[in-house]
Image (cartoon, rainbow, N blue to C red):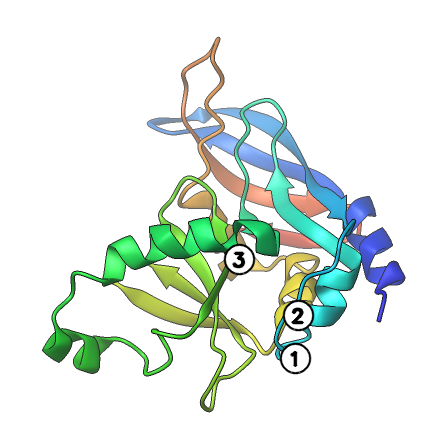
Amino acid sequence: MKLERLFEEVSAHRGTFLCEEIDSPVNTKLVEFSHEVHAAERSFELPDIGRLRDFYDTFASVVFYVDQRSGDAGKHLASPSTWPELDDEFRAWTDHVGEDEREDYFPDWIDTCLVIGEEPRTGNYLLMPTEGECVGKVFLFDHDGYEFTEEADDIIAYVDAMLAPDNQLLVGMASHMRFIESDAPVQWWIRDLNDNRGNFATTTA
């Protein structure tokens, strides 16, 4: 099923980050963000879980919260054509872990999950279990601490959350977005977000 309204909503969503210079918060700047949205041009054989088929009938991929000047971005739902590459990158973090530790710290669906996206430039990945109680849900794997955090009940709910940013989402993105430009190698921290849907979020709460 085509999700034309959702495609239009993602394409139209934009706003600004109010940022402060790291180590010198008296200096601030506004960074404009939008989403890089690519329409589906081909079909993929996908499992009937987590509304994957609906999403990829409409979208080829989406990069969320993009700053065009630095190239920084918050999240990336990737094209299925790139999932094998993402899977290899993700497995590089987990395949070396011993069997005992895997049983203690990893979810039971880790060996068969899909790697459907990432937090760009971080080594963190978006995962979808294909079996078990969590089938179809979206999880974030954070390699710092090997944490698996449930993000949404399915991929459409995940996109809806990206369009309704809250403080928790903003803190997560602020932890890895620095907005470094080639002609101004200064690092910035996101303080506040305002968007054209009337949302406000802050990292100072």
Residue for point 46% across, 54% down: 84
**Nearer to us: label 3 or label 2:** 2
Q: CA distance from mark 3 to mark 2?
A: 22 Å
Q: Report the side of 18 relative to 21 (left or right).
A: right
The mark found on residue 52 in the picture is: 2
Q: Report the side of 177 relative to 56 (left or right).
A: left
Assess whether mark 1 and mark 2 are in contact (beta carbons under 8 angstroms): yes
Q: Is residue 104 above or below residue 2?
A: below
Residue for point 66% across, 52% down: 200
Asked which secondary structure carries label 2, the reply is helix
Residue 188 location (% of width, % of height): 45, 30
Residue 196 location (% of width, % of height): 79, 46
Q: Report the side of 30 relative to 172 (left or right).
A: right
Looking at the image, which is closer to me, 21 or 161?
161
Does label 3 or label 2 sit earlier along the sequence? 2
Residue indicated by mark 1: 48
Residue 177 location (% of width, % of height): 46, 38
Residue for point 57% across, 44% down: 192
In the picture, residue 71 is in which quadrant?
A: top right
Asked which secondary structure carries label 1, the reply is loop
Look at label 1 and name its amino acid: Asp
Q: CA distance from mark 2 to mark 1?
A: 7 Å
Q: CA distance from mark 3 to mark 1?
A: 28 Å
**Quadrant of the frame with the N terminus:** bottom right
**Nearer to us: label 3 or label 1:** 1
The mark found on residue 169 in the picture is: 3
